[in-house]
Amino acid sequence: MAAPLPQRPRVVIVGCGFGGLEATRALARTDVDITLIDRTNHHLFQPLLYQVATAGLAAPAISAPIRHILRRQMQRGQLTVLLGDVTGIDAQRREVQLDDGACIRYDHLIVAAGATHSYFGRDEWARHAPGLKTLADAFELRNRVLKAFERAERYPEQREHWLTFAVIGAGPTGVEMAGTMAEIAHHTLHDEFRHIDSRQARVVLIEGADRVLGAFPPDLSRRAQEQLEKLGVEVRTGCRVTHIDAQGVTAQMQGQDAPYVLPARTVVWAAGVAASPLGQALQASTGVALDRAGRVVVEPDLSLAGHPEIQVIGDLAAAKSHPKRGEPTPVPGVSPGAKQMGRHAAANLVRRLRGEATRPFRYIDYGSLATIGRKAAVAQVDVPLIGNLRFSGYFAWVFWLFVHIYFLIGFRNRLMVLMDWGWAYWTFQRHARVVVEPPRHRTEEAP
Amino acid sequence: MAAPLPQRPRVVIVGCGFGGLEATRALARTDVDITLIDRTNHHLFQPLLYQVATAGLAAPAISAPIRHILRRQMQRGQLTVLLGDVTGIDAQRREVQLDDGACIRYDHLIVAAGATHSYFGRDEWARHAPGLKTLADAFELRNRVLKAFERAERYPEQREHWLTFAVIGAGPTGVEMAGTMAEIAHHTLHDEFRHIDSRQARVVLIEGADRVLGAFPPDLSRRAQEQLEKLGVEVRTGCRVTHIDAQGVTAQMQGQDAPYVLPARTVVWAAGVAASPLGQALQASTGVALDRAGRVVVEPDLSLAGHPEIQVIGDLAAAKSHPKRGEPTPVPGVSPGAKQMGRHAAANLVRRLRGEATRPFRYIDYGSLATIGRKAAVAQVDVPLIGNLRFSGYFAWVFWLFVHIYFLIGFRNRLMVLMDWGWAYWTFQRHARVVVEPPRHRTEEAP
């Protein structure tokens, strides 16, 4: 009688964003059985999501079907991809619970469930000021922005209200949204209405801190603000939002007594990020600490204290970088961070399988890059031997463009996005100006 | 004191499908003031909607913003485009009522509001068997089809149920949907699952009449059925649906006593078409007759009896073609018919402005064309001097392809669709495989 084949270690990876996808790929040559679970059927190239929201790109241009990009690992019999929602984690039984009641056992778990919007406890603001994390969010924002111009055309007496747009939070997403919305108003739509002049639209970027792009050096923040203003964006820094409703935004300007009232009918929330609720599930099951944003405090090797078989990466992790010299520093919530954590978690998993010691995570910072709008961006890049380069304007914008095209998933998407951008650049047009109302019948759910 | 300028005749056009768009364009050089009202912000190239539903094209590839394609007429001060829902027509006061209570006065009215699905009084079937008329419908179907394969992978015990697809109605849309779904199952997805073989999926096309594509000559119906079966579609003609629910479809096969039961989890409705409810609004206001499908019975010149200032065109009109010789024949519900009616209505309007007599509508039939799937189509074309040509298979498919590319709105869309199809042809891939769940927060409506 033949002995049963020894079972391969079961690895469960939750989430197929930058971190989860990279971890899955990094395990391609390891003799493990991987189950990758995601709520959607596609990997989303989130840095370009604002382009879908502002009608510059179609959704398929920045989304790649997970099954398709990982089909070789699947064909090798190493990987199962599941469309599902993880609702709980039982660290004692080493099980992940799905929304349909199914439980999936693991020997090693990598949680890369990402982040969602946070309204700092003011969840009632959500319906007036949607955020931008998923394709559904992007469609919602696209509908609101395009319909605001339609409403202004139809209701001349409410013109000012409909033509005032507020973007709250001047991080990279807020800056991109504000810059692109100004471009839409001033160029794309300017000759397509009869009762309004779309160029009279106001786009106001509201930031609580005293400068935009707070993660960048102050001189680049200044350059970014100059470029935003040149594009027609009004920038209000030192301005804390106190209320949002259908009438607009109320805020408190630094050093002023009277509240700042902005009658904006369309508000975009780009201010707060909270970790996925799976952080709380992990805390409930393992007692691990969470930080203020709900992110899981991980060990230097990205595992949980007392649970070396669980690793948390990406935006869900309050991770630190452990440089060769000097103090540990927080890892910024950017895609290179998530990807590096994904690779590192996979490498540590392999080390554990071999009985070796795991290694602390070290984040390699290649620089930061933020686009603002047409021909406008800021960049700081660490070049080995040369040092830290900072630049802005047209050159930074071209640099941003090529970096993003390069990192886009899939040859075809790269080509399509390049074509779309070429088209948009020369014609000032945005081809995805399609307002689709949600379907009347909801998709039927699984039993 | 200068005399007030004589007011230009006010033309209101309801709907910007093929008929409404063509009528608007045909009036470009006429001294009238046009208001074009549509429920969406885009003109939809409906013949390719099934490609969006089957993940072959992104929505923006077949949708052109109405304001953009008509911007020159707008700039000339001749045209106002309104995003709005027409809820009523008052023929006595010559007013069109909008959903927000606004009334728009007209001197001449062209109603091109199109058609919607009809479930023959069984509206409860709608949630189990969505139809395909709008982009929202296409997204819903895309979600259902792609998710069915995901469910089959996740629930092996329900595999058969999830992998059975029914298409009801074997007109052009039903045939296209069935053929393309078979292609997805047999080619696109075949190596991307681990627990199922997508090639085991059944696609069943159910038709009440005794052949597919009933509007085509019987020999082409036979060729179409052969090609469908070669693509892996099971064709059930002479099969009348009696019930649809979450368990599947029940039907009555001609000459059989026992009902035909198909346990299909995903059902596509391509059987019944009903005219827009504006037909009833016109009847209420003018007493005009409606046919069984709710279409408005029009005079030979497309106007309403007793209301020469109102014209009804496209799928909403029960129009007849008045050939030079012979009896009048019904105009088929295809896009060339709607476009020709649009041009004809505009020409008759100009004649009335000049005090000339209007002319009866004559439909010029250039032939019919239906695609079935990869390298499969049927065509009959009337070629002057040569006569009626019928062909099928690869050549008909290439012909179909170029005809559709040619008629697509906008140079850019043509190029994009051509690229998408080239890509799909060589790789068997469909790039728009993106499941997007409806947004959590609904778009806020106008006050």
Image (cartoon, coloured by chain):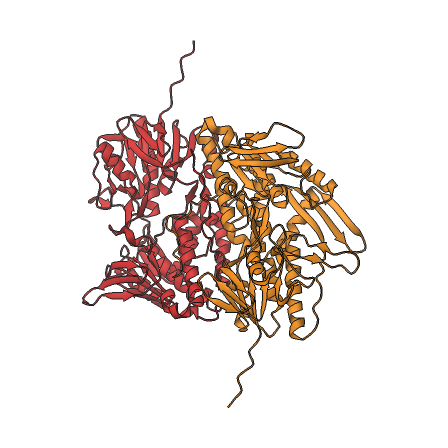
Chain colours: A orange, B red
Q: Which residue is drawn at 66% across and 48% down?
A: A400
The number of numbered badges drawn on the structure is: 0
* Foreground pick, B173 / A383: A383
Residue A223 placed where, x, y %?
A: 71, 39
Compared to residue B235, the image places residue B90 above or below, namely above
Rendered image quadrant of residue B37: top left
* Coordinates of residue B96 in the picture (x, y in percent): 33, 31
In this view, A248 is above or below A270? above
Give the left or right position of residue B310, taking residue A388 as reference: left
Q: Is residue A418 visible?
A: no
Outermost residue, top side:
B1
What is the residue that sits farthest to the right in this orientation?
A: A385
Q: Which image quarter is the C terminus of chain B in?
A: top left
Quadrant containing the N terminus of chain B is top left
Q: Where is residue B314 in the image (x, y as percent from the top left)?
A: 31, 42
Instruction: Answer with the quarter of the image where residue B28 lies.
Output: top left
Residue A439 relative to residue B252: left or right: right
Q: Residue at x 51, y 64 (%)?
A: A67
Q: Where is residue B446 in the image (x, y as percent from the top left)?
A: 43, 35
- Between A445 and B48, the residue placed more toward the observer is A445
Nearer to us in this view, B56 or B4: B56
Question: Which residue is outermost to the bottom?
Answer: A1
Residue A126 seen in this snapshot: yes
